[in-house]
């Protein structure tokens, strides 16, 4: 691959980041909110300055695709969770894997699993490393797990087969978003799954974590786009049948989707594709309040119109991303189709919006999506992770959590979660911060609220402050009936709340299933369930 | 309940069946095809004539909701699978359960599971008993399973809560179709899940078997309509959280949906509802051939229009059900909405049809669905089970099997399955029969073909003849890449093919999960996996 390699610290690939202009904007916004920098800048460690313990394993010559190189180990130490950033910023790379494997085929994966089992090494599957929940941190405890091996799927990144008739493709799990879309484009097809991490995450990672993508309705999660799967487990290969639908027992795919690497390593999948859109319509709709926008969101979702985009931003979130002047809430609304003009759909959705005071910005222009409020929001959204990584160097805490809740509880839920998070910011940092909300996906029975918080922290305490704030938010999420995650996954960071949400007997069933597929408990110990 | 009780033999409730006029039509059609009756009529046994062994268990006084009455045991001996009918017709009720429990609440279910465990009795959950795959036959082997208890959920049939805002209701698993729709109607809501068995099947049965319902696209299976579940397992109660969407680990609901009673007894569910439709459009579209109709079906499915109904019938199937003169294939096409007029959707779908030679019968009339070809087909569809039960008394074999396949294999698949089934009919019965096909549900990546076969059998050999024919059909289904069932479930009858289709490692995981929830293996032994 000719692309630059992933950074050893921070978001994306080497050379990518905020432009100077973007950086200036981000820092100016932060100063408007929190005043001039109170904390010294802490710069990320240079690769050469990172200290790593010698690898605890010797790689046999039979596994030439395994590396113990400094870069490989450093770059696979962390995902992108906030506490990982704080440790990385402090130069703490003690958790680095001993070995990083880059399998070239399934046989290599089988071989590395066999070897790791014999060596009492944990195995961490790794796609793009964009986990924000501690899902790719190597596990080592000196006892049961004497060493840690990370398996990076980057060399299994091809589109192997395209079936235009059924609109499906067989794609290797290590394919990054841009690469797989690039290979599908000549066929007039697209997976149309664009998580925020699109450029630095992989198909296998999306499936393993139930990633949420482009579509705000209907095909929200990757789940529904999976036609069949191939998974290498320590007990062998599991492959499901390519079927458009089935009623034969509990779905094998659905056990693997969201299994976060604890049951096996997904190596390829037949994915359901879309025609590339030819018709588009939509734009931004402004509302007097977030809850007015919420009522319109419910109306659109329950109308059965299935917009591709239908996201609402509260006034502060809209302001922060340049989508409004901060006095209106905004709905980013878009229909698209590869088959037919979307006017009838859009017209009815705008009627639903008007019923709740929604005023379209420029609803009748097909290119409105790339301009105006909707376009501003979209650009800010994609650059967000770079801003987060920049601000933390100034001791500023910025993070998000997302959930889902049924409509009849939505407003109270929102207020409780927001208030709890705001309170925790004051308690943890001694001053007010900011908590904003948008709804990223929507279902007929409820929305998926996504909370963003900003706080001024102190170096040395960042991780504890972040933990206090996020815990308060998630405590409120769980106490008020939500899910600990709508699409960021559970990993290790969300375990305490997941454990309260998930039925204990399901945990018992999942643990038993894992023991059947991974009897030594090699794979991602501590993720989803205890090892 | 004031409804008549279920028949001890045959479809539906006591007093229901073909009208004399319908019976005359059914018998005339059969004579047109196979000539005058070659076999003597065999009448089903009267209830009083059925011999049952004494119950092998004494019911303790603490379980007053358990019955060993003659009717209760006889009426729970069989589902509605063809080989069950042949045994029932022969008066063979040796498999009758020893005890039938009618729990009044979850505590009763817990109590009966405890008692059955101590008594080494198998436990068969029973909704409406409409299984066509041997899913409700009691299991007894004299060793591990010394007796058999059937748990009939009919007294847990209420709608407990309705949430109009989120369009959802909490419904007990024993609710039959008409009863639950009756309770939802005053709220302006509907589950809109109408399997052929609607009148004699229950919500819990639908969920346990991944039933297929009203919607030909999108919400085809009950799966997507389940918001959360409560299940009593031998290890306790498992309850999932009410969420419109979640990305927290593998879905607990999806492990239970389709579990066919082997993991626990579903007692209630929050179900996602629809607004009652106010706008309708559609009708029948005639095509020169089944495959031309198939091409249109694919175009409509891939256009993202989501018709409520979009089923195609081959010319013979259309003829048999009065939907065409036998020279055209028919698409039954319908859009419906509780929110908006459906003209734009229907117009585009009819364009897709016209591209493949489809000619609408009366496309612009909103009531076309209840008349013409579409209406004729619908009526025939609902009365079909009664006809099947009547014809078997004359030694005529009629049965169905359904599957799903991706588009690029559809035509070849159809031809292979049809030819294999036709050949098997000739070999098993010595004369030609009839095999027809429709597609009952459709996805962007493929249709769900549904095969019906008719053959002239011989009393005494009916079961063997049926088995030879159905096996040949399913062998072809599996060999050519389909699923053993799209929505009829696996039960015990489909096990040999399910075992070939299902990844062995998924079987291992499912077995382990079952052992965690049902360590004694009490529940539905032999269904989906070996006990």
Image (spheres, coloured by chain):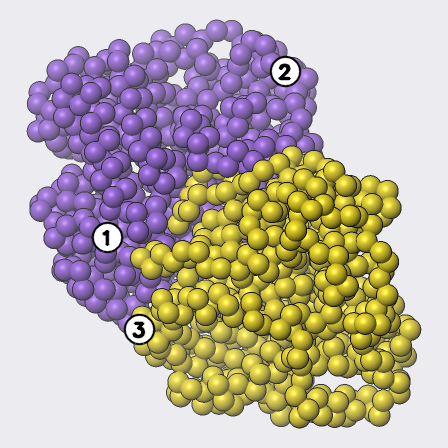
Chain colours: A purple, B yellow
Q: Are marks 2 and 1 in contact (CB under 8 Å)?
A: no
Crowd around label 2: few <14 · some 14–19 · many ≥20 (10 Å):
many
The answer to whether B338 is drawn above or below residue A186 in the figure is below
Of A179 and A152, nearer the camera is A152
- What percent of the width, then of the height, locates residue B274? 40, 65
Which residue is pictured at 36% across the width and 26% down the height? Answer: A81
Q: Are marks 1 and 3 on the same chain?
A: no
Q: Are marks 3 and 2 on the same chain?
A: no
Q: Is residue A79 visible?
A: yes
* Image quarter hosting the C terminus of chain B: top right
Host chain of mark 1: A
Q: Which residue is mark 2?
A: A120
Which residue is pictured at 45% across the width and 77% down the height? Answer: B334
The answer to whether B520 is drawn above or below residue B158 in the figure is above
- What percent of the width, then of the height, locates residue B424? 84, 72
Q: Which residue is mark 3?
A: B340
Residue A128 has which mark? none
Q: Earlier in the sequence, mark 2 or mark 1?
A: 2
Q: Could you tell me how far apart the alpha carbons at marks 2 and 1 are, in whole angstroms?
A: 51 Å
Q: Is residue A222 left or right of residue B430?
A: left
Residue A294 has which mark? 1
């Amino acid at each position: 691959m000719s692309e630059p390699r992933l950074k050893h610290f921070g978001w994306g690939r080497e050379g990518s980041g905020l432009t100077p202009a973007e950086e200036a904007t981000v820092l100016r916004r932060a100063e408007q909110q929190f005043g001039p920098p109170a904390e010294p800048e802490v710069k990320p460690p240079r690769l050469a300055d990172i200290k790593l313990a010698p690898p605890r394993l010797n790689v046999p010559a039979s596994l030439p695709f395994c590396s113990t190189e400094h870069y490989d180990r450093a770059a696979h130490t962390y995902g992108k969770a906030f506490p990982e950033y704080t440790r990385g910023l402090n130069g703490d790379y003690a958790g680095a894997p001993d070995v990083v494997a880059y399998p070239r085929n399934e046989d290599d994966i089988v071989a590395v699993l066999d070897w790791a089992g014999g060596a009492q090494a944990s195995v961490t599957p790794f796609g793009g490393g964009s986990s924000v929940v501690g899902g790719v941190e190597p596990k080592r405890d000196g006892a049961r797990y004497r060493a840690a091996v990370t398996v990076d799927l980057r060399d299994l990144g091809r589109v192997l087969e395209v079936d235009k008739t059924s609109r499906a493709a067989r794609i290797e799990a290590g394919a990054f978003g841009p690469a797989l879309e690039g290979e599908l484009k000549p066929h007039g097809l697209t997976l149309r799954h664009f998580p925020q991490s699109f450029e630095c995450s992989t198909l296998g990672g999306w499936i393993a974590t139930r990633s949420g993508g482009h579509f705000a309705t209907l095909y929200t999660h990757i789940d529904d786009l999976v036609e069949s799967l191939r998974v290498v487990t320590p007990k062998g290969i599991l492959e499901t049948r390519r079927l458009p639908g089935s009623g034969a027992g509990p779905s094998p795919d659905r056990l693997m989707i969201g299994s976060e690497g604890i049951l096996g390593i997904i190596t390829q999948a037949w994915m359901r594709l879309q025609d590339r859109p030819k018709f588009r319509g939509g734009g931004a709709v402004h509302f007097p309040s977030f809850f007015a926008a919420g009522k319109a969101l419910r109306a659109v979702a329950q109308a059965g119109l299935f917009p591709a985009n239908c996201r609402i931003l509260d006034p502060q979130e809209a302001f922060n991303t340049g989508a409004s002047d901060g006095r209106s809430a905004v709905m980013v609304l878009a229909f698209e189709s590869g088959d037919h003009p979307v006017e009838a759909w859009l017209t009815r959705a705008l009627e639903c919006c008007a019923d709740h005071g929604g005023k379209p910005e420029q609803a009748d222009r097909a290119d409105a999506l790339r301009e105006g409020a909707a376009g501003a929001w979209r650009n800010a959204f994609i650059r967000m992770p770079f801003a987060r990584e920049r601000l933390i160097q100034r001791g500023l805490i910025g993070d998000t959590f997302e959930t889902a809740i049924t409509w009849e509880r939505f407003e109270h839920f929102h207020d409780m979660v927001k208030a709890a998070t705001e309170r925790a910011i004051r308690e943890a940092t001694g001053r007010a911060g900011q908590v904003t909300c948008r709804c990223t996906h929507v279902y007929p029975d409820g929305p998926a609220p996504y909370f963003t918080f900003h706080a001024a922290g102190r170096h040395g305490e960042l991780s504890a402050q972040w933990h206090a704030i996020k815990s308060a938010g998630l405590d409120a999420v769980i106490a008020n009936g939500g899910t600990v995650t709508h699409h960021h996954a559970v990993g290790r960071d969300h375990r305490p709340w997941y454990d309260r949400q998930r039925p204990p007997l399901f945990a018992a069933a999942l643990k038993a299933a894992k023991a059947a597929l991974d009897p030594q408990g090699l794979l991602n110990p501590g993720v989803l369930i205890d090892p």
